[in-house]
Amino acid sequence: MKDQKSLLAKCLHNDIPAIVFQGSDSCAIEILQAAEKIYRKNGCSPEFLKDFHENVVDNFKVYQQENKSEIKLPDLTPSEKEAFYILQEKEFANFPSQIKDFEQHLKEYGFSQINENTLSHGKYIILNEKEWNGITAKNGDYDFAINHNKEKKQINYFLFSNDSNYPERIGDYDSLKACFFDVMVKHPLQEEKKNLTFMIEEYRKMGYGNIADTIKRYSINIETTFISEEAKYTIENIEIQTCGAKTMIGDFTISQKDNKPMAEINNYRILDKSTGKIESLNIDNINLSKQPPEALKKLLSGQQAEMTAKSGITQMMGLSKSPAGWTLQVGKQTFNTIDSSVEL
């Protein structure tokens, strides 16, 4: 391709409506992102943009990774970034008062601005194109948008969601604000984050750092699940404890009760990293996630450990191996600490 960088720059700034691309796929992801911007300029719905991003752009990124094809445009220098934000602020000063006012409400409710083409939960985007400008924000299943046609001096208000309580096209700014405040009362951004933070800290205090880190890594997905009023979010194959070649894993499920997250681990298994074999673990009436991490480490090493049952009774227990898998039994020790694949 001739002058690939110049063509890409023109496309990203919407100087050309479309491109014909022939050659390697080394810069195709940037081309797809440019197409995203063109679709947004043409007024495509958030649903279409989301579908295009997830099923076209993201899928192509996976394709590139699988084929070890990677391209990265040069990052902006600090001075270029500063100039960009100064220009952005000057342009925003000319936006309609409704857009500037709505941004203030978004900030007050915990939203933060991103400079991307695709919205994510708790974020908002300020858009400034040649013929129109606007602002759009996302709270779970709810997408708010204000579009301003510069030439016609016309402003349109939207609320895209699957909630039949709200119209998609809203007549005036006061009505949009009323819908926005109503949604934010029902689905505040920060509440789930605070509750998840407490849960993360509790697991960390107990010594389960990996569980805490995993919850933190998936926190945005978990929050979005709760806001969308889905029943639960499950993280499969979470690592609970490791000793030598053996790792205890399980499926970590977070549900919500009285607007508070509740955690549960089930489907316990033991992974033998030396063989890659995963076998079930029958825990009977023992809640392993409530046991000290050092006790689980002892079990995996072949030693007996003090376990507290759900009834409150404490006793020494060990892992027992059978063709059906692993079982917790009183006073059992079935493999030594040197070679954990050998049964005693």
Image: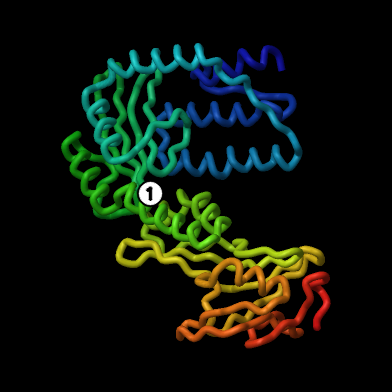
Front-most of residues 172 and 75: 75
Identify the image quadrant of residue 19: top right
Front-most of residues 308 and 113: 308
The picture places residue 84, in percent across and down from the top left corner, at: 45, 15
The picture places residue 236, in percent across and down from the top left corner, at: 58, 63
Identify the image quadrant of residue 319: bottom right
Q: Residue at x 73, y 42 (%)?
A: 66
Question: Would residue 122 appear left or right of 56 to someone viewing this image?
Answer: left
Q: Quadrant of the N terminus?
A: top right
Q: Residue at x 52, y 80 (%)?
A: 308
Front-most of residues 333 and 144: 333
The picture places residue 22, in percent across and down from the top left corner, at: 71, 24
Residue 217, placed above or below residue 173: below
Residue 31, placed above or below residue 221: above
Furthest toward the left, the residue is 174
The residue where tag 1 is placed is 140
Q: Amino acid at mark 1?
A: Gly
**How packed is label 1: few (under 14 Cα within 10 Å), some, or many (20 or more)?**
many
Q: Secondary structure at mark 1?
A: loop
Question: Would residue 39 appear left or right of 283 to someone viewing this image?
Answer: left
Residue 200, placed above or below residue 190: below
